[in-house]
Image (tube, helix red, strand yellow):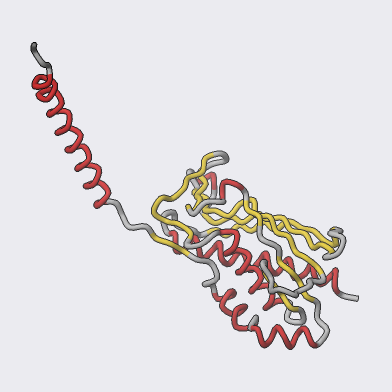
Amino acid sequence: MDTPAPRSTRTLTPLVLVFLLSMTGCFSLGRDAPPQQHYVLGGSDASAAARALATPSTQGAQELEGGHVIGIRSVQVADYLASPFIVVRRGAYEIGFSDYHRWGENLGRAMNRTVAAALAARAPAHRIEGAPWPSGTSPDVLVQVKVLRFEGVVARTSADGESGAHLLATWEVLGALDGAVLARGTTDVWSGGWVPDDFDGLVRLLDASLDTLAAELARGLEQVLTP
């Protein structure tokens, strides 16, 4: 009785070779791809100054002098920002995710840490705690920040102006016990002068915009906490 096995073997062998060659091409492309670059927030001059002022010993002294305890809740980010990829907007509706330029940590937690440090520098009479705050901490007021945009913006034509960085965020100061809204605001920061594909420059601009957010939060807190 005849068996078709030899014929099937002759048919499959070229297919296997094609598959192996295609895989070789994929690996070759992977080796030629540029390396991934990772970025963190908190490296601007303003952030460095904030870190220098917001030390644990300083915070403890401030609390003893009668300052308030301010808890910064976890920053909420728009869904499209909740990824490791740095976002670049082109036009009103198109956004791009950079495969090779990524955040080195969770973006919401990075913002929380950076804003808390910048706010501590601007409100030295108070103790600032970013979520999650230490066990036993009882904030007097809470701050909730929602970030709607945090991205580079590419100008397609001269009519669009210059390329830059855009931060858009809303914030509320809440009573710690009842959650009542004591103050609220919107921070909209446009920083021009970005050269597209200069991601180090983009991160610097975005980082600095968080200091502006902290400054507006400090003014809102002052209105609430001043007798």
Quick check: 193 left or right of 99? right
Viewer-closest of 122 and 6: 6
- Against 88, residue 61 (above or below) is below
Q: Quadrant of residue 17?
A: top left
Viewer-closest of 86 and 44: 86
- Against 165, residue 207 (above or below) is below
Q: Quadrant of residue 178?
A: bottom right
- Farthest residue to the top: give it: 1
Viewer-closest of 108 and 19: 19
Q: Residue at coordinates 63% horizontally, 53% vertically from top-left?
A: 77
Residue 190 at x, y percent in the picture: 61, 57
Where is the C terminus found, in terms of image quarters? Answer: bottom right
- Against 154, residue 220 (above or below) is below
Quick check: 183 left or right of 210? right
Q: Quadrant of residue 44?
A: bottom right
- Farthest residue to the right: give it: 227
Q: Residue at coordinates 65% horizontally, 81% vertically from top-left?
A: 54
Q: Residue at coordinates 86% horizontally, 64% vertically from top-left?
A: 177
Residue 146 at x, y percent in the picture: 68, 55
Quick check: 209 left or right of 153? right
Residue 148 at x, y percent in the picture: 64, 51
Residue 14 at x, y percent in the picture: 13, 28
Where is the N terminus found, in terms of image quarters? Answer: top left
Task: Report the label total.
Answer: 0
